[in-house]
Amino acid sequence: MDHEPVRATDPAVADALEAEVDRQRDTLAMIASENHVSRAVMSAQGSALTNKYAEGYPGERYYAGCEQADVVEELAIERAKQLWGAEHVNVQPHSGTQANMGVYLAMLDPGDRILSLELTHGGHLSHGHPANFTGQVYDVEQYQVDPETGYVDYEGLADTAAEFDPDMIVSGYSAYPREVEWERIQEVADTVDAYHLSDIAHITGLVAAGVHPSPVGISDFVTGSTHKTIRAGRGGIVMCDEEYADAVDNAVFPGAQGGPAMHSVAGKAVGFREALEPEFVDYAEQVVENARALAESFRERGLTLVSGGTDTHLVLADLRDSHPDLTGGTAEEHLADADIVLNANTVPGETRSPFDPSGIRAGTAALTTRGMGESAVREVGDLIADVVDAAAEERTDTVVPEVRARIDDLTDEYPLYDGGGGTVFE
Ligand SMILES: *Cc1c(COP(=O)(O)O)cnc(C)c1O
């Protein structure tokens, strides 16, 4: 990775940047929201467009000199339309949260009612948590997953909607391993005359590749992050029908943001271009196959999975049955020692603190980018179970170094950013 210009002027930051590349090479990134972008996406993100103010939209900017900004943003929009089939796309949100902010600001007034999934059941902070602006500006009620099945409680959602009469229903989640039935939620939204926002932040890539049903054309608004399964670098996106285009565009800028991060928009354009290649469908299918393999290995080792398995890129293990005295946080720590980086996560019916919850969440998007298939991922699942068992039995002193040595071999076998080429696959 070329950090030479940084090294010449700022060795402290260059050291950290290089150490971060090494960290990503030498560990398994299993935080379900993470992935590794190509060198091409990184190069676009590190481009001179970071210097350019391009307030406004292509063809109607507030400042001169936006010719190339227009080219890049139009390409990002066109490619997004091809990937997801939306009528209108805004690629300027700085992140998924800003994309959601754009939709709320476009359609709601302060005090309006939002119905969304509880955070501990898989929802997101930007869906109405009190620590987020959404919980402070809007009146929020929440629905849940069925405690028995781990699937969204669609009937409970309909009942709560009938009572609460929301102005907007939010679907799409952060820690939900199953396919979302967008139509069912849309029917509820129709019944109570609410807008429907589907936040596909985690599954943008799976939806683009057709391996998860798409809410585009069903829900009024679809938002996403661009750095998760779609692998297009950090940022956000809003999609909607033409009738809401002006409202959304005005809400994103000038409503919620100033100038767009045009270097990030360039990263999105390049990442979307990569995702239009037929290989991306293979990638997305493999991500899901790998998650199923991971779920299988966890089940074989006696771990309880929320919803019993997965249809997506992630699995969520509830440790309370199998390892009643082990918290997710302790498991996360020992796994990090073994060079497996995932996160402790709340589970439905959480009985511990969100700071040290009862579950662990693991995703396969980044491992699949490195080229791993089911057999490698199944082995990783076993290694995770080895560490979890050892953590519960206080045997980590011997087990963690063994697992770390095996991860060292695996990360060599599936290299990342090696070879000096243009993509992560070399
Ligand atoms: C990741 C995520 C977001 C956006 O997060 P940012 O960090 O702001 O990009 C929004 N919604 C859901 C459901 C997410 O999982």
Image (cartoon, helix red, strand yellow):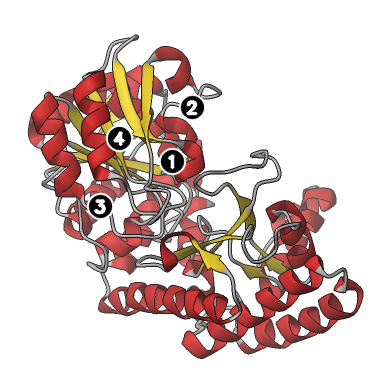
Indicate the amino acid at tag 3: Leu
CA gap, disc 2 to disc 3? 35 Å
Task: Determine crowd level at label 2: few under 14, some 14-19, many 20+ residues with C-alpha closer than 10 A.
Answer: many
Task: Determine crowd level at label 1: few under 14, some 14-19, many 20+ residues with C-alpha closer than 10 A.
Answer: many
**Residue at the image position 90 percent from the left and 80 percent from the top:** 398
Percent position (x, y) of residue 177?
41, 60
CA gap, disc 1 to disc 3? 32 Å
Q: Which residue is mark 2?
A: 129
**Residue at the image position 27 percent from the left and 60 percent from the top:** 207
317 or 269: nearer the viewer? 317
Residue 167: in sight, yes or no? no
CA gap, disc 1 to disc 4? 9 Å
Query: Which is nearer the N-term, disc 3 or disc 4?
Result: 3
* Element marked by disc 3: helix
Q: Which residue is mark 4?
A: 170
Q: Which residue is mark 1?
A: 123
Q: Which residue is mark 3?
A: 75
Indicate the amino acid at tag 1: Gly
Please tell me whether mark 3 or mark 4 is closer to you in this view.
4
Q: Quadrant of residue 90?
A: top left
